[in-house]
Image (tube, grey):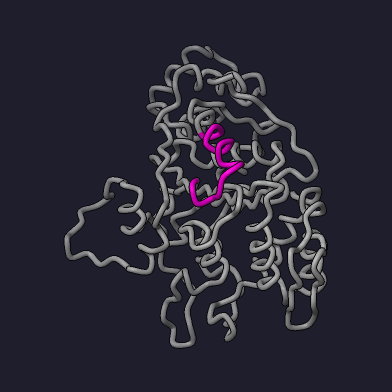
């Protein structure tokens, strides 16, 4: 199976349909008659890591996928999401974490937690989480009585019904989301995968502003802080893993020094000993492990992907062998360039 590109059918509650996808991947899936991905060596390696994690605390498996732009990090993350759903995990997938920090989501200050809540995003996340994980959430119950501002949720309430409280009262979504994650942290029936794309954006300065028009730090926003707590091990799942993917193509949210240091990544520009680093962000990077994604598709992997596009009639008929070798060479094996600057360019010729 390694080196083969395979198409897959989407069910009604598939994570692709419900959680969504990164923009580039979404456009690519719309071109083909059905989505496909390549099973690579790194796919098998990551699956093996997750299979070991299903019986251990997420403290032991906090991985960040990294590599050059277009090498396939987002596809690998999606493959792990699909694998975990098929393997009876509970999955929380955030395909565009940049939307948590780029000021496209409504926010409000909460005096109780002294953070900025994002009720709309919290509501949508709960809605999607409930749809994708409906069977597993229905089988799990709260381990204690939960007291909220307007109501109480008795011990033994199913987690599916707990989410339902927020869906009936959207204003309570932020606190329900936090409570749900706490409940998922202590249960041991199902491992939990927290998968986050645009992971580096959660460590960057946000586009949100406080009343004094100063930039709000990511850890002062409730949902980014929730994710950072699990990423850094301040909070953890009894069984499961945290998996992030760095996006290199977004110049507004580049990988910050604190994250580069923690993952041992090469610096993207000249650095000085006097460059400042945030002690708070350094705390939120502790325990993260780098998982490099190969920069190039192998020839068999690229050939298998080419064959899918060819059979789908998404490539203009001509000398296929010549086109394949030309586009693979031009893209230097980079997965995104092979498709976007290679295969799709044949449609314009």
Q: Residue at x 49, y 74 (%)?
A: 220
Residue 210, how many percent across, how many down? 48, 82
Q: Is residue 156 magenta?
A: no
Q: Residue at x 70, y 62 (%)?
A: 124
The stretch of residues the image draws in magenta is 46-60
From the viewer's side, name the closer residue of 23 and 318. Answer: 23
| Prevailing secondary structure of the magenta residues | helix
Residue 86, how many percent across, how many down? 71, 36
Residue 161, how many percent across, how many down? 82, 63
Is residue 246 rendered to the left or right of residue 157? left
In the displayed structure, would residue 4 be above or below residue 91?
Answer: above
Residue 266 in sight here = yes
Q: Residue at x 75, y 60 (%)?
A: 127
From the viewer's side, name the closer residue of 164 and 296. Answer: 164
Residue 55, quarter of picture: top right
Q: Residue at x 44, y 55 (%)?
A: 200
Name the quarter where the N terminus is drawn. Answer: top right
From the viewer's side, name the closer residue of 210 and 175. Answer: 175
From the viewer's side, name the closer residue of 15 and 311. Answer: 15
In the displayed structure, would residue 312 be above or below residue 255?
Answer: above
Residue 349 in sight here = no
């Amino acid at each position: 199976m390694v080196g083969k590109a395979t198409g897959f059918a989407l069910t009604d509650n598939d994570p692709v349909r419900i959680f969504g996808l990164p923009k580039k991947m979404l456009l690519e899936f719309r071109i083909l008659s059905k989505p496909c991905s390549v099973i690579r060596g790194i796919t098998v390696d990551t699956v093996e890591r997750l299979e070991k994690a299903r019986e251990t605390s997420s403290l032991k498996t906090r991985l960040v996928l990294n590599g050059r732009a277009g090498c396939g990090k987002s596809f690998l993350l999606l493959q792990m999401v699909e694998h975990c759903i098929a393997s009876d995990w509970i999955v929380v997938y955030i395909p565009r974490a940049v939307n948590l920090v780029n000021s496209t989501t409504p926010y409000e200050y909460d005096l109780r937690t002294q953070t900025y809540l994002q009720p709309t995003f919290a509501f949508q996340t709960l809605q999607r989480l409930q749809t994708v994980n409906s069977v597993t959430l229905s089988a799990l119950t709260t381990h204690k009585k939960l007291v909220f501002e307007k109501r109480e949720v008795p011990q033994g309430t199913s987690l599916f019904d707990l989410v339902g409280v927020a869906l009936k009262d959207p204003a309570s979504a932020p606190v329900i989301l936090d409570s749900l994650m706490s409940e998922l942290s202590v249960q041991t029936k199902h491992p939990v995968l927290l998968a986050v794309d645009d992971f580096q954006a959660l460590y960057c300065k946000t586009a949100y502003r406080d009343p004094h028009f100063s930039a709000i730090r990511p850890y002062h926003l409730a949902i980014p802080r929730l994710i950072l707590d699990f990423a850094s091990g301040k909070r953890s799942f009894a069984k499961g893993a945290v998996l992030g993917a760095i996006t290199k193509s977004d110049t507004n949210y580049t990988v910050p020094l604190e994250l580069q240091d923690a993952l041992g990544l090469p610096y993207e520009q000249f650095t000085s000993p006097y460059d400042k680093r945030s002690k708070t962000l350094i705390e939120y990077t502790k325990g993260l492990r780098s998982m490099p994604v190969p920069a190039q598709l192998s020839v068999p992997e690229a050939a298998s992907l080419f064959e899918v596009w060819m059979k789908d009639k998404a490539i203009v008929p001509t000398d296929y062998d010549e086109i394949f070798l030309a586009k693979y060479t031009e893209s230097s094996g980079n997965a995104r360039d092979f498709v976007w600057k290679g295969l799709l360019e044949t449609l314009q010729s």
